[in-house]
Image (cartoon, rainbow, N blue to C red):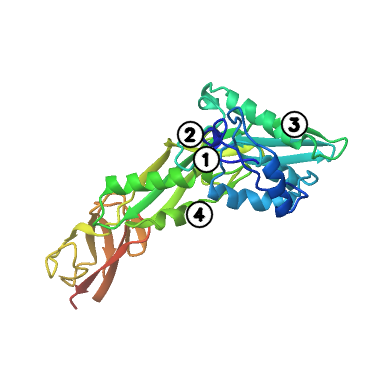
């Protein structure tokens, strides 16, 4: 009789096994007869109990193991079987010749783990070294696959290469949400989205998927990735494409969140000569100005509430607080003034109607 699962806590104590339950090749009556003439015991405590696999891990790894049918022929077979080794978390196999397979493997971590460089003592880019944990995993994988490969096939088991990635993101929020708490939630979500357990070898990360994830967070109005890149390579909005040996790592220090204003109003609007009707207020958008017949030009000075806004007068982009010369005609001349917020999506249009008397 065997008891399995539970790890060391499942190793049974001495003299606990006393009964036969099944003997291969014998029926129940024959087992009962044999049990009456034989005694059974375990004089020593059990050892070597294997830790149970989590339900989540079983759901992922069991179909892979069944697909491989306990033999390593295709690269997928190597990956699936490697995940059956104790403490194996991720595997990626590559080969240019069928006789030589390179298998990248990394350790398993539970969902609550915050370890960002499993198998290493610290960030390998800053002096972290491989631990015995990975050496044990290497031996376990090699031993497991040794008798499952085709004759003449050699296997090299290699540790992962962890690649630091950087993210720069602009966002806008709804006014009722606090910036600090919202950014804390966004940072936590991003670190979880790109955590070790949610990453893999050879992964591809698109800026659009990051934007979609951030927009799904309650309180975020809009999001735009301005930078997604390998930290060592500089900057730019890119699609991250991992090599077969690479696992991307996002550290909190390499994630920059910048809130953009959604304010798209003028703080002031003046004209010379003349007086507005009504008097200017930021949230009113239509104004009238009457000038004498001899006034062929007026000077209009719009000032935005937020310096990062984009300002246009009569279709041309201008600087905030700088006077603009407008040519008038007898009758009415409409002067459109457009303000677009830094978020790129919020805008307001002001209209100044100038009447030049006949």
Q: Which residue is mark 3?
A: 156
Q: Which residue is mark 2?
A: 115
Q: Position of residue 145 (x, y in %)?
A: 75, 37
Residue 243 in view in this figure:
no
Q: Quadrant of the N terminus?
A: top right
Q: Position of residue 117 (x, y in %)?
A: 53, 32
Q: Residue 199 sits in which quadrant?
A: top right
Q: Residue at x 84, y 36 (%)?
A: 153
Check if mark 3's residue and mark 2's residue have beta carbons within 8 Å. Answer: no
Q: Which of the marked residues, 1 or 3, is nearer the chain's N terminus?
A: 3
Q: What is the CA distance from the residue labelled 2 to the residue labelled 4?
A: 24 Å
Q: Residue at x 23, y 72 (%)?
A: 353
Residue 292 in view in this figure:
yes
The relative height of residue 20 versus residue 121 in the rendered view (above or below) is: below
Which labelled disc corresponds to residue 209?
A: 4
Which tag is nearer the camera, tag 2 or tag 4?
A: 2
Q: Residue 267 sits in which quadrant?
A: bottom left
Which labelled disc corresponds to residue 196?
A: 1
């Amino acid at each position: 009789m065997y008891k399995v699962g539970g790890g060391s806590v499942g190793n049974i104590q001495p003299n606990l096994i006393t009964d036969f339950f099944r003997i291969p090749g014998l029926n129940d009556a024959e087992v009962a007869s044999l049990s009456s003439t034989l005694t059974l015991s375990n004089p020593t405590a059990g050892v070597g109990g294997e830790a149970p696999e989590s339900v989540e891990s079983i759901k992922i790894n069991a179909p892979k193991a069944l697909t491989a049918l306990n033999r390593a022929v295709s690269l997928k077979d190597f990956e699936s079987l490697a995940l059956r080794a104790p403490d194996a978390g991720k595997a990626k196999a590559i080969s240019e010749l069928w006789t030589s397979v390179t298998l990248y493997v990394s350790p398993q971590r539970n969902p609550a783990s915050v370890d960002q460089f499993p198998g290493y003592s610290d960030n390998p880019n800053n002096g972290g070294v491989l631990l015995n944990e990975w050496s044990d995993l290497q031996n376990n994988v090699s031993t497991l696959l040794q008798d499952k490969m085709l004759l003449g096939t050699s296997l090299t088991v290699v540790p992962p290469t962890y690649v630091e990635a950087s993210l720069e993101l602009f966002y806008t929020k709804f006014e009722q949400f606090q910036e600090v708490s919202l950014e804390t939630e966004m940072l936590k979500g991003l670190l979880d989205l790109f955590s070790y357990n949610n990453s893999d070898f050879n992964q591809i990360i698109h800026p659009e998927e990051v934007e979609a994830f951030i927009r799904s967070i309650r309180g975020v109005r809009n999001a735009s990735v301005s930078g997604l890149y390998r930290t060592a390579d500089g900057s730019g909005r890119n699609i991250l494409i991992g090599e077969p040996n690479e696992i991307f790592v996002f550290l909190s220090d390499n994630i920059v969140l910048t809130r953009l204003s959604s304010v798209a109003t003028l703080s002031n609007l003046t004209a010379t000569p003349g007086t507005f009707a009504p008097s200017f207020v930021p949230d009113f958008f239509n104004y009238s100005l009457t000038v004498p017949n001899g006034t062929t030009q007026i000077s209009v000075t719009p000032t935005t509430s937020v310096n990062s806004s984009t300002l246009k007068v009569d279709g041309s982009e201008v600087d905030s607080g700088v006077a603009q010369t407008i040519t008038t005609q007898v009758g009415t001349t409409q002067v459109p003034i457009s303000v677009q917020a830094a978020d790129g999506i919020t805008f307001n249009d002001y209209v100044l109607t100038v009447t030049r008397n006949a």
